[in-house]
């Protein structure tokens, strides 16, 4: 039903969540259609309300504990105050706000027959509903709402016709889904003409629930289902802000229907951890992996993010051996962050202040980056395991820097990541200014 009725509407955004909605709906009257994935209330025995005319209102099913609701989201930002500044000019104080209205759908024998926001007036199509409310206000919760500008799909909101998932080539898996090799039609223009070229990508699939689950299995999975949606959208929202050679490039996210897909640049050499374990890497190359990764982290910190999950397993290596920081599932847009509840965290990689007070900051990332350097020179071995003979190749100056500067209990005495990059560049005798320019933006 989603395919037939919604997928071709240009302002239908599928499972886009409110965090991203705030980025899309910018001015009063901007609107879009989306789906809301909500916990289900206790359903009636038959799962549907049926009138004498045979009409049924969707969507209830006694065997599911979540439901998908069609939502019309509108920006209703209004001017709420005008003040005169010290310099005599007028400052308008605005409060950005979006309103979500359920679009009710009626069906007969499985076919969608009418749509309405206000029960008093029904429409035979969504196009008719939108056209009417562009000229007439929606009276919703004592507010008169006009639809002015439809917000079309953005470049990062992908359509299925430009994406192929190769399920026979699995790259990995996580808590909520699996990662496969894929093919993506990358857009480009020449002399104002649009073209596409197919390139390899990594596609993270989000498994939200299975149609074949029993009711008991679904009860166990329903919280994971919503958590999966929010994690993938959190990761997408953060990656939208990042464009750097040493950060995994974000291609887009497919949200129009399930399964939801997060699409990123494909790195032929896999994770840095795997690469170090399989390939003989000399000291100079290892230092370059350290410097490239520190440049990526420097950029991430510049953008106001804390990564919180640095490790060689979360740094990927491209075909030309460029290290790229990946996996932003735990990242936070903040200068500091205190964990408020228990969650799964990589204890081996935590700074002392995180272990004792659950605190994260850019300086905790710097401590963890010291462990990344350790892993690189230990050929991908995890921290706090028995030292291997090859570790004697680690330059003495680097060992001392990590031990005395990065692995310190007082985070105030740790350098920032820019100082770490400077130290590594000096070891390699490269011009960091030139490196930063080279490594800047893709």
Image (cartoon, rainbow, N blue to C red):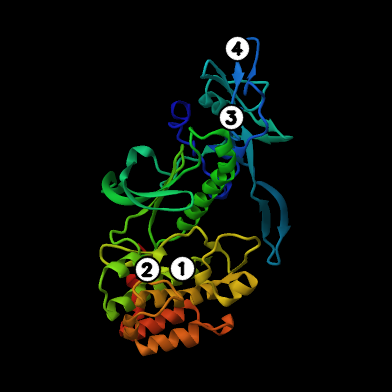
- Rate crowding at label 2 as few (under 14), some (14 to 19) or many (20 or more) other CA atoms within 10 Å: some
Front residue of 284 and 101: 284
Element under label 1?
Answer: loop
Element under label 2?
Answer: loop
267 left or right, relative to 139 = left
Q: What residue lies at 66% left-to-right and 62% top-to-bottom?
A: 340
Image: 5 above or below 315:
above
3 or 2: tag closer to the N-terminus: 3
Disc 3/disc 2 C-alpha distance (Å) = 52 Å
Residue 373: quadrant of the picture: bottom left
Give the number of the mark in front: 4 or 1. Answer: 1
- Rate crowding at label 1 as few (under 14), some (14 to 19) or many (20 or more) other CA atoms within 10 Å: many
Instruction: Tell me, yes or no, whether the two marked residues, 4 and 1, touch with CB atoms within 8 Å.
Output: no
Q: Which residue is mark 3?
A: 63
Disc 2/disc 4 C-alpha distance (Å) = 62 Å
Residue 308 in the image, given as x and y percentages of width and height: 52, 66
Q: What residue lies at 33% left-to-right and 82% top-to-bottom?
A: 389
Q: What residue lies at 51% left-to-right and 26% top-to-bottom?
A: 127
- Rate crowding at label 4 as few (under 14), some (14 to 19) or many (20 or more) other CA atoms within 10 Å: few
Q: Which residue is mark 2?
A: 440
Q: Is residue 165 visible?
A: yes
Disc 4/disc 3 C-alpha distance (Å) = 22 Å
Disc 3/disc 1 C-alpha distance (Å) = 41 Å
Q: Which residue is mark 1?
A: 310
Residue 280 in the image, given as x and y percentages of width and height: 25, 73
Q: What residue lies at 44% left-to-right and 40% top-to-bottom?
A: 259
| Disc number placed over residue 54 in the picture, else none | 4
């Amino acid at each position: 039903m989603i395919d037939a009725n919604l997928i071709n509407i240009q302002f239908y955004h599928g499972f886009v969540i409110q965090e991203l909605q705030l980025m899309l709906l910018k001015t009063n009257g901007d609107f879009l259609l989306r789906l809301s994935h909500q916990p289900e209330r206790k359903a009636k025995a038959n799962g549907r309300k049926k009138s004498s005319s045979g009409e049924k209102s969707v969507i209830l099913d006694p065997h599911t504990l979540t439901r998908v609701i069609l939502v019309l989201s509108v920006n209703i930002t209004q001017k709420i105050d005008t003040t005169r500044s010290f310099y005599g000019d007028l400052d308008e104080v605005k409060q950005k706000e979006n309103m979500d209205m359920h679009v009710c759908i009626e069906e007969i024998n499985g076919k969608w027959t009418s749509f309405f926001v206000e029960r008093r007036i029904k429409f035979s199509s969504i196009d008719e509903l939108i056209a009417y409310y562009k000229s007439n206000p929606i009276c919703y919760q004592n507010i008169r709402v006009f639809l002015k500008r439809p917000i079309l799909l953005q470049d990062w909101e992908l359509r299925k016709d430009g994406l192929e998932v190769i399920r026979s080539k699995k790259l990995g898996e996580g808590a909520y889904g699996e990662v496969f090799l894929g093919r993506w039609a990358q857009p480009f223009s020449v002399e104002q003409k649009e073209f596409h070229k197919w390139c390899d990508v990594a596609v993270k699939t989000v498994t939200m629930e299975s149609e074949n689950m029993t009711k008991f299995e679904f009860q166990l999975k329903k919280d994971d289902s919503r958590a999966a949606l929010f994690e993938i959208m959190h990761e997408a929202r953060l990656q939208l802000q990042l464009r750097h050679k040493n950060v995994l490039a974000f291609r887009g996210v497919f949200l129009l229907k399930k399964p939801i897909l997060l699409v990123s640049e494909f790195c032929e050499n896999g994770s840095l951890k795997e690469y170090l374990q399989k390939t003989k890497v000399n000291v100079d190359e290892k230092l370059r992996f350290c410097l490239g990764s520190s440049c990526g982290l420097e950029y991430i910190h510049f953008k106001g993010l804390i990564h919180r999950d640095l490790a060689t397993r979360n740094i990927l290596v491209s075909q030309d051996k460029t290290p790229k920081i990946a996996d932003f599932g735990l990242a936070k847009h903040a200068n500091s962050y205190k964990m408020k509840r228990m969650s799964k965290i990589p204890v081996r990689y935590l700074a002392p202040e995180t272990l004792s007070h659950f605190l994260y900051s850019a300086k905790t990332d710097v401590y963890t980056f010291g462990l990344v350097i350790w892993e690189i020179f230990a050929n991908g071995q995890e921290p706090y395991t028995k030292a291997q003979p090859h570790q004697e190749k680690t330059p003495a100056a680097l060992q001392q820097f990590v031990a005395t500067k990065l692995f310190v209990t007082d985070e105030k005495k740790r350098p920032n990541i820019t100082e770490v990059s400077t130290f590594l560049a000096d070891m390699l005798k490269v011009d960091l200014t030139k490196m930063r320019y080279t490594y800047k933006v893709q």
